[in-house]
Amino acid sequence: MRRIVVFLALATTFAGCSSLADNGMTIFADPSKYQYSTCEDLARQRQTWTTKEQELRQLMIRAEQSAGGAVVNVLAYKGDHVAAREELQLLDRAARAKNCDGDAKNWPSNSAIQ
């Protein structure tokens, strides 16, 4: 029982690291990855990563409904989910830097303004 408590405490600590992605820092993604991508490439990549992030979020929701779901989330899905969110943030930054507006209504930064 003590091992489980220690494990859950560590898992919660590492899960808290995912908030670093909101501050502009990335753990899993390369910040210059999309530097030379065109707006069309960025839109395609964004669709791919959006789908992946949504799938992972659904898996995490389903896992939480079972016994031990929090552990499963941290071990199986949390890292991939954080990576997908970081990729989406990088894509958003790259699109803003390149003034991509062909599909601007789908970028989160613009949908918040509307």
Image (tube, grey):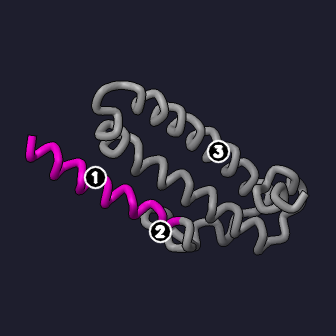
The disc placed on residue 20 is 2
The residue labelled by disc 3 is: 50
Q: Is residue 15 above or below residue 23?
A: above
Question: Residue at (44%, 60%) from the top-left corner?
Answer: 18
Type of amino acid at the residue the image marks with label 1 = Ala
How far apart are labels 3 and 1 at the CA level? 25 Å
Residue 86 vs residue 114, the one in the foreground: 114
Q: Earlier in the sequence, mark 2 or mark 1?
A: 1
Image x and y of residue 12, in percent: 32, 54
Question: Residue at (90%, 56%) from the top-left corner?
Answer: 102
Would you say the residues marked 2 and 1 are in contact, meaning their CB atoms lie under 8 Å apart?
no
Q: Residue furthest left?
A: 2
Residue 40 vs residue 71, the one in the foreground: 71
Image x and y of residue 35, in percent: 66, 71
Q: Is residue 97 left or right of residue 32?
A: right
Q: Which residues are magenta?
A: 1-21
Tag nearer the camera, 3 or 1? 1
How far apart are labels 2 and 1 at the CA level? 16 Å
The residue labelled by disc 1 is: 11
Q: Is residue 7 magenta?
A: yes
